[in-house]
Each structure stands twice: as structure tokens, then as C-alpha cells.
Image: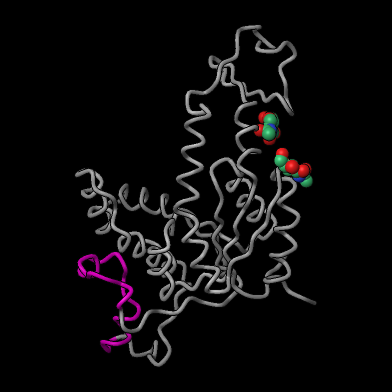
Amino acid sequence: MRLSRAARIILVGAPGVGKGTQAERLLQRFPQLSAISSGDLLRDNVKNQTPLGIKAESAIKSGALVPDAMILRLILHELKTRGWLSAPAGTSPLTLSSTSASASMQDYDTDSFVEQPSLASYPTPPQTSDDPSASFILDGFPRTAGQATQLDNLIPINLVVSLRTPFEVILERIAGRWIHAPSGRIYNTTFNAPKVPGKDDITGEPLTKRSDDDEETWKHRLKKFEETSEPLLEHYSRKGVLWEVSGNSSDEISPKLYAEFERRFAASN
Ligand SMILES: *[C@@H]1O[C@H](CO)[C@@H](O)[C@H](O)[C@H]1NC(C)=O
Ligand SMILES: *[C@@H]1O[C@H](CO)[C@@H](O)[C@H](O)[C@H]1NC(C)=O
């Protein structure tokens, strides 16, 4: 399905809610959408030893977090490379040699730019293209309200989807998940139960839990998610771009998500 305007979206959901599944389905259904993952950008830049990649790598090696400003630059650089940034209003893209225009179309991973303390205070942020082909799902950033604030002036996100599945449903699903460790075969007691309880269908060997499928571990992960995502969602709610969808499974959520997405972004003809 074709889009009629640019979608710049973020999916927010607890671990186990199927965020990756929804993202994949959206990408399939709306070919103009791209996935932009801050984690992938970081890995690529480190691998290719770009100026930002080198800086990020040394932060990682010293055990520090990669600073938000660096992640923002990686994202901006990617958008620029794709041709999705235009010069800020009031500057002429034709006067490339003038200071204002060249500053506005900065290479976001050049050395001088890496050293700048804050992008958010940048006087004339570039503008993101409203062409439907400049549509993307941003993954991995922002995770906190503070990061969202930094992103706001640079890349105006126009839809934040909060994917909601009751925690007890997620925990139930995890509790029902068993694996045959040697082969990696996964069973779950609701949908795909082993023929003999506790035994692998093919070898008859005993099934085990994945070490990270422990209930306490999951409860902790879910609680942490709730703590950081609440202010993030509040932030986007105040901006008027938050939309919530709930369901007990991915298949229950997807049709609702498609309908809302089409209502907001697809061509109405
Ligand atoms: C159960 O396993 C099947 C097959 O791997 C999978 O498609 C389904 O989503 C799983 N269901 C749950 C609730 O984890
Ligand atoms: C989703 O799961 C909750 C908790 O188990 C249950 O109360 C509710 O009825 C379920 N909703 C649907 C639509 O199946």
C-alpha cells in the first residue's frame, strides 16, 4: 500500500510483546517504509571506522555508554545520506559555499561535528523530508524521555505506537516456552505442545527452559521497561503523537495497527 505522506514512527513495547514482529509486518505491507536501527548504524560505523564509529568504539571499549549525541548524529547522518534531510527554512541549498548552508547540511560524522557538545542547541536544524519515500521506523532510540527531547527538534516523529499486552499474558507465554537445547527446537504449551509432555518430538530427549526464560528475570525486565517507558510515552502523549494498541497476541494487534497506520499515512483516493 502506498503512503501519501512521510511516516516517521517509533514502536514502543515491553520485551515479549512482539515489537520486532509488528515492525517486520509494517515493512512488508508498506514498502515505502524503511527500518533505521541505531544499533545497526552503530555497528556499521564501527566496522567501517568512520569518525563517529571510531569515537563510539573507544567509548564502548572504555566501558562507557555511547553518548546520546553520538547516536543522534549517526541517525542524522543516515537520513542525510539517504537524501531525506533538506536545508533549514530560510537557507538556500544553492549557496553551498556560504557558511549557513554548509553548516545546515553538515556531515554529521565529520570530526569537527563529533566534538560539538549538543545538537539540540544547533541554531538551524535541518528539516526532514515529507516525501512518502522518506518514511521510516526508528528502532533503538529514543529509549528515555530525555533522549526523546533531544530528538524532537531534529527529527519530528509523527507517530509513536505503544504496543500493549498484559504482563501476565507475556509471562504465561514465557512460562509455556520449552526448548530442546541440542537442536534449538522450541515448543510452547499453548500452541505447539510437544507430543509427550516434557519430551522432544524427534529425539524423545528432555526439554528444558532457556536460562533467560526464568520468571523472576522476566518480571524484572518488564518492571524496568515500565519504569523507563512511562516517561517516554508521557512525553509523546503531550506532543500529541502517541497511539496505543492492545492485544494478547501479535495477530490480534497487527490488523488494528494496519488500520490506524493507513488512516494516518496512506493515500486516500
Ligand atoms: C508458540 O510457538 C509457535 C511456533 O514456534 C509460535 O508461532 C507461537 O507464536 C508461539 N506462541 C507463543 C504464545 O509463544
Ligand atoms: C487477554 O488476556 C487477558 C488475561 O489473560 C484476558 O482477561 C482477556 O480476556 C484476553 N483478551 C482476549 C481478547 O482474548
Percent position (x, y) of residue 191?
A: 74, 28
**As drawn, 134 above or below 92:** above
Pick the quarter of the image with the C terminus.
bottom right
**As drawn, 34 above or below 156:** above
Left or right, 61 with respect to 256, comes to: left
**As drawn, 232 above or below 247:** below
Pick the quarter of the image with the N terminus.
bottom right
Percent position (x, y) of residue 115?
A: 20, 66
**As drawn, 252 above or below 181:** below
- Residue segment shown in magenta: 97-121
Q: Nearer the viewer, residue 140 or 130?
A: 140
Q: Which residue lies furthest to the right in this view?
A: 269
Q: Nearer the viewer, residue 214 or 74?
A: 214
Percent position (x, y) of residue 185?
A: 61, 21
Q: At 37% across and 90% down in the image, what residue appears?
A: 91
Q: Is residue 45 magenta?
A: no
Q: At 66% across and 6% down in the image, what residue appears?
A: 204
Q: At 31% across and 68% down in the image, what residue appears?
A: 108
Percent position (x, y) of residue 54?
A: 23, 52
Q: Nearer the viewer, residue 130 or 205?
A: 205
